[in-house]
Image (tube, rainbow, N blue to C red):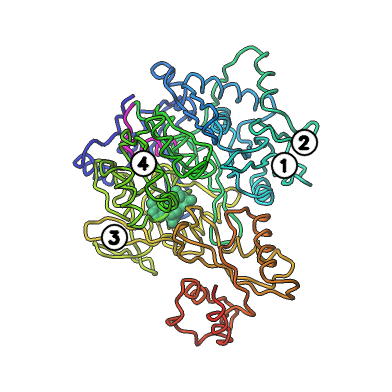
């Protein structure tokens, strides 16, 4: 497969960029023309950021799975679509060709239909990283059902919240999942989430760990049994549902500054076009390359750069079930050597954690197949960038530092491998089609280079979020109301003298812990569920490996027993309410929080103390009780 929209050199980048600004509709119409449409669009783009109302490829008809599967069968049918590497290196890996994947997706799509799933229905997917997860996602897309994948580390309560919010009547899960030396009982977590829930009609359970599970009569069915049923029904194919360009493809929940995660909605055509376009251009994918994205499909990175982008491009995507440090810290390098991986896409937190093991685990592995390295999820510090460059890429591989968000669907700012230069700790330049701007607090655009401000985007790109599920107003207020006529990212950034962007991090109350987005308000709500807690305030602080750590200040009522036990108890509460990823790294008990006379918590002070700053805490004169600051400083953990 060759890609008409693949940019080939720096001059090509410049001219594509210019065209994308002067004639966005012409630019995206050309890109979209290389996909398979049941019916072509009438108009490339209709939009306003006021409501917002954004429509790409108006009245176009398509199905994303025909682009990911059917259209490749003639040319790539016997080529690997997915290579699956299990958690345990002793277990056999799997290679799924495009033909196999087409068959499996069709079969499972028929299973969904058989179980009553219809176009537009929401299907919650809670699975580990096994091929059946990708198959489930694609099967939903095949029949026009809207998938909502929930990361396997979330708690029963988090699943329940998401099920209710989306009114998802169907669930696809596994008996359990293997991750490192752990065995996570996914079905049992689903059972907890469903206690008292009346609207879930079917739970389809795939086997992986053989952990004993309880199956509820009439509701719970086994994946394998359901496959057997459709096998005896004759026709193994499942015709793809014809979707409107703007029909929703999926919902993915992500944290914001309130206590309740938002269901970001992406639509079929724009998401397909942009993930494929950005995949091919950022990584400079060449036919035959093996692409290894280490994310979990439970996050947007997995949706866009394990499943949809690579498959629509006819690429070979490597899916890994395990973790970077088990059985040892050479796991990634083993996989790269074993499959001769060409592109490695991972997170700074993983790089920093592997750096900590020294060069021993890297040595003895042949990494010469690597051509391109990528990072995503958080700012990469220079030290990690250089280690990645020297010891993994051996100074021969460009590193693409890709900045994007759940809401953007695909990479917006990044260098392109071998096409535009990288710069340590800089995401560098926008992709053609993306128009970033920096604004000051008042929303005034900061022109020229060598400036810093809040990062906004002033023109839509095809995979911009369309709404937040069930609450369009929330979408407007969150992203389109802070600054008029712009999408506000929530990130701060600098633009250097050459026009390269450096993302400095969130400017709202969202933390980025090991590349995972966590709202401080969510963690506070969870902590406050503990019976002994009066109130709490959560802030981030710099953490060597995780990027940011979670620091919780807790006002506790009557302390029975010792502090250490109470801390354990609070951590358990957070794990129960959200999941282990949201556990505070530090808990400091305080007798009160620094508040203004109007009762607002002064987080600035708490942040500074958590960062280790004790001198310059700024203006504390508006505090109701300046005394608490002394106590907090003295009690710092
Ligand atoms: C893809 C993803 C989004 C937030 C975003 C940023 C941060 C992501 C980079 C980055 C600096 C990067 N989606 N972020 N990529 N910061 N450089 N290359 O991570 O929705 O989970 O998170 O992540 O703060 O707003 S996400």
What residue would you read off at disc 1?
188
Q: In this rendering, is residue 355 above or below 55?
A: below
Residue 48 at least partly seen: no
Residue drawn at point x = 49 percent, y = 39 percent: 303
The answer to whether mark 1 and mark 2 are in CB contact below 8 A is: yes
Determine whether, in the image, residue 521 is placed left or right of residue 388.
right
**Quarter of the figure that contains the N terminus:** top left
Q: Tell me the tag on residue 214.
A: 2
Mark 2 closeness class: few <14, some 14–19, many ≥20 residues within 10 Å:
few
What residue would you read off at disc 3?
495
**Residue 520 position by quadrant:** bottom right
Region of the chain picked out in magenta, as a range: 272-287
Residue drawn at point x = 34 percent, y = 36 percent: 367
The answer to whether mark 1 and mark 3 are in CB contact below 8 A is: no
* Marked residue nearer the N-terminal end (1 or 2): 1
* Marked residue nearer the N-terminal end (4 or 2): 2
Q: How much space separates mark 2 and mark 3, taking CA atoms? A: 55 Å
* Marked residue nearer the N-terminal end (2 or 3): 2
């Amino acid at each position: 497969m060759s890609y008409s929209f693949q940019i080939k050199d720096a001059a090509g980048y410049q001219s594509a960029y210019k065209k994308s600004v002067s004639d966005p509709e012409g630019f995206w119409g050309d890109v979209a023309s290389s996909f398979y449409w049941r019916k072509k669009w009438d108009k490339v783009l209709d939009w306003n950021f006021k409501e917002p109302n954004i429509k790409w490829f108006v009245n176009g008809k398509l199905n994303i799975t025909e682009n990911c599967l059917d259209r490749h069968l003639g040319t790539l049918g016997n080529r690997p679509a997915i290579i699956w590497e299990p958690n345990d290196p002793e277990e056999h890996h799997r290679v799924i060709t495009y033909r196999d994947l087409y068959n499996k997706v069709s079969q499972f799509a028929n299973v969904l239909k058989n179980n009553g799933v219809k176009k537009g229905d929401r299907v919650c997917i809670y699975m580990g990283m096994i091929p059946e997860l990708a198959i489930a996602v694609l099967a939903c897309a095949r029949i026009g059902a809207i998938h909502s994948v929930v990361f396997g580390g979330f708690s029963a309560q988090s699943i329940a919240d998401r099920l209710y919010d989306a009114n998802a009547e169907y669930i696809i899960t596994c008996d359990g999942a293997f991750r490192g030396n752990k065995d996570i009982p996914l079905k049992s977590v689903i059972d907890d989430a469903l206690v008292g829930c009346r609207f879930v009609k079917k739970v389809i359970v795939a086997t992986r760990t053989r952990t004993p599970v309880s199956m509820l009569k009439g509701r719970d069915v086994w994946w394998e049994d359901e496959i057997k049923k459709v096998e005896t029904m004759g026709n193994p194919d499942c015709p793809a549902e014809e979707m409107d360009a703007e029909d929703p493809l999926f919902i993915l929940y992500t944290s914001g500054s309130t206590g309740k995660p938002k269901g970001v909605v992406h639509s079929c055509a724009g998401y397909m076009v942009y993930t494929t376009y950005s995949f091919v251009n950022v990584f400079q994918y060449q036919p035959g390359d093996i692409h290894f994205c280490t994310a979990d499909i439970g996050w947007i990175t997995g949706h866009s750069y394990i499943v949809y982008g690579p498959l629509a491009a006819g690429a070979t995507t490597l899916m890994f079930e395990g973790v970077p440090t088990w059985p040892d810290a050479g796991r990634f390098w083993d996989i790269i050597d074993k499959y001769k991986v060409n592109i490695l896409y991972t997170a700074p937190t993983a790089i920093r954690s592997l750096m900590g093991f020294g060069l021993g685990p890297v040595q003895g592995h042949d990494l010469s197949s690597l051509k391109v390295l990528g990072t995503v999820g958080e700012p990469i510090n220079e030290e990690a960038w250089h280690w990645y460059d020297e010891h993994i890429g051996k100074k021969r591989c460009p590193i693409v530092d890709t900045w994007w968000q759940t809401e953007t669907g695909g990479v917006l700012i990044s260098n392109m491998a071998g096409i535009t230069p990288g710069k340590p700790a800089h995401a560098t330049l926008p992709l053609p089609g993306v128009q970033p701007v920096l604004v000051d607090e008042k929303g005034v655009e900061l022109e020229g280079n060598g400036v810093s401000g809040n990062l906004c985007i002033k023109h839509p790109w095809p995979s911009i979020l369309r709404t937040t599920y069930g609450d369009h107003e929330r979408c407007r207020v969150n992203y389109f109301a802070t600054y008029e006529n712009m999408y506000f990212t929530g990130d701060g950034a600098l633009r250097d003298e050459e026009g390269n962007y450096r993302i400095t991090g969130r400017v709202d109350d969202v933390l980025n812990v090991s590349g995972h987005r966590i709202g401080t308000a969510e963690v506070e709500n969870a902590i406050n569920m503990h019976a002994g807690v009066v109130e709490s305030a959560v802030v981030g602080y710099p953490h060597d490996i995780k990027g940011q750590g979670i620091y919780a200040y807790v006002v506790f009522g009557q302390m029975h027993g010792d502090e250490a036990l109470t801390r354990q108890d609070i951590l358990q509460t957070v794990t129960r309410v959200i999941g282990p990823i949201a556990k505070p790294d530090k808990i400091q008990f305080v007798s009160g929080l620094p508040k203004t006379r109007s009762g607002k918590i002064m987080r600035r002070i708490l942040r500074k103390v958590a960062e280790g700053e004790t001198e310059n805490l700024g203006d504390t004169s508006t505090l109701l009780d300046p005394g608490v600051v002394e106590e907090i400083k003295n009690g710092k953990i």
